[in-house]
Image (cartoon, rainbow, N blue to C red):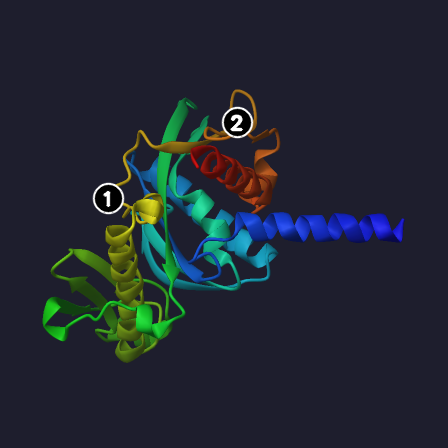
């Protein structure tokens, strides 16, 4: 019995190694969520998706830090970015890139009608090898400072501590307002800019990672990867692999590994078929 368990463990390890064999797979990453059209309903859904990833990161024992969060006018978020630190964070999270669709009876609709909402997810690896970074010239950056409008304590809200950085040649933008000082916010925003520019350069050099390097603005609402239905029935289904579960609550509480491993396994099979 002990020998059988050891064989299963070894087999599982080899399978995971095969699924996470990409050059950037061992990296930590940024996960970004942006709400789609639909105002408050979509903003609320985007907040639910971001919370799902925070709980997933916690389940896996990763360190999670909020980099940016732009709240909606009434509820939820328009956009948010978290940094996920841990071994193979990018390798797993890359399976989540695309558009996530929610169908439910809206808590914001007094007539209790069913609504469909969208949230787009992008994932960026954080390269550990400094020599692999693209050199960014200071002259290519536009740095804007403004008053923090979110959490961060009295200090953050009474000084121009928030920072937005624009990489002019690519149009890539990053904002950070969660740190206490302008210096810390600038460093966090710059780290995001560096990761996104590095990823863009990787995509130029090879199309292999092209699907992971889409910016949120490039993701079209037609590129849905997963559907979350809360009413009239309850189901979460991945449209790429047909993997599905009938307990949406567990998925929204971060139980994503079934979906992720199913996608990675299907991607591995496809790569082998293409050879």
The residue under the point 85% across, 52% down is 3
- Quarter of the image containing the C terminus? top left
The residue under the point 19% across, 68% down is 146
Label 2: how many Cα within 10 Å (few below 14, some 14–19, many 20+): few
127 displayed left or right of 189: right
Q: Position of residue 224 (x, y in %)?
A: 38, 32
Instruction: Classify 198 as above or below 184.
Output: above
252 displayed left or right of 146: right
Residue 102 visible, this orientation: yes
Q: Position of residue 200 (x, y in %)?
A: 25, 55
Q: Nearer the viewer, residue 127 or 65?
A: 127
The residue under the point 31% across, 29% down is 222
Q: Nearer the viewer, residue 223 or 188?
A: 223
Instruction: Classify 70 as above or below 42.
Output: below
Secondary structure under the numbered disc 1 in the rendered image: loop
Label 1 or label 2, whichever comes before in sequence order: 1
Residue 188 visible, this orientation: no
Marks 1,2: beta carbons within 8 A: no
Q: Of the numbered discs in the image, which one, if any, rests on residue 242?
A: 2
Write down the residue under mark 1: 217
139 displayed left or right of 55: left
Taking the view exactly as shown, the residue that stands out farthest to the left is 139
Q: Quadrant of residue 140?
A: bottom left
Taking the view exactly as shown, the residue that stands out farthest to the right is 1
Instruction: Classify 267 as above or below 90.
Output: above
Secondary structure under the numbered disc 2 in the rendered image: loop
Q: Nearer the viewer, residue 265 or 175?
A: 265
């Amino acid at each position: 019995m002990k020998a059988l368990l050891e064989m299963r463990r070894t087999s599982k390890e080899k399978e995971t190694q095969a699924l996470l064999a990409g050059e950037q797979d061992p990296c930590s990453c940024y996960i970004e969520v942006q709400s789609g059209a639909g105002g408050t309903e979509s903003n609320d859904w985007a907040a639910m998706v971001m919370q799902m990833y925070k709980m997933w990161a916690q389940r896996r024992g990763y360190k999670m830090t909020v980099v940016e969060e732009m709240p909606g006018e009434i509820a939820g978020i328009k956009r948010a970015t978290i940094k996920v630190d841990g071994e193979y964070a990018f390798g797993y999270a890359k399976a989540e890139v695309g558009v996530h669709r929610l169908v439910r009876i809206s808590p914001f609709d007094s007539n209790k009608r069913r609504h469909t909402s969208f949230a787009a997810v992008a994932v960026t690896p954080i390269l550990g090898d400094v020599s692999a970074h693209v050199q960014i010239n200071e002259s290519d950056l536009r740095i804007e400072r403004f008053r923090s409008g979110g959490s961060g304590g009295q200090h953050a809200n009474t000084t121009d501590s928030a920072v937005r950085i624009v990489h002019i040649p690519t149009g890539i933008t990053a904002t950070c307002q969660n740190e206490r000082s302008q210096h810390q916010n600038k460093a966090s925003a710059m780290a995001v800019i560096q990761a996104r520019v590095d990823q863009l350069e990787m995509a130029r050099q090879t199309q292999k990672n092209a699907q992971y390097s889409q910016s949120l603005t490039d993701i079209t609402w037609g590129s849905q990867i997963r559907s979350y239905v809360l009413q009239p029935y309850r189901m979460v289904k991945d449209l790429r692999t047909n993997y599905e579960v009938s307990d949406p609550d567990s998925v929204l509480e971060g139980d994503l590994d079934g979906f992720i491993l199913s996608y990675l396994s299907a991607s591995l099979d496809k790569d082998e078929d293409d050879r």
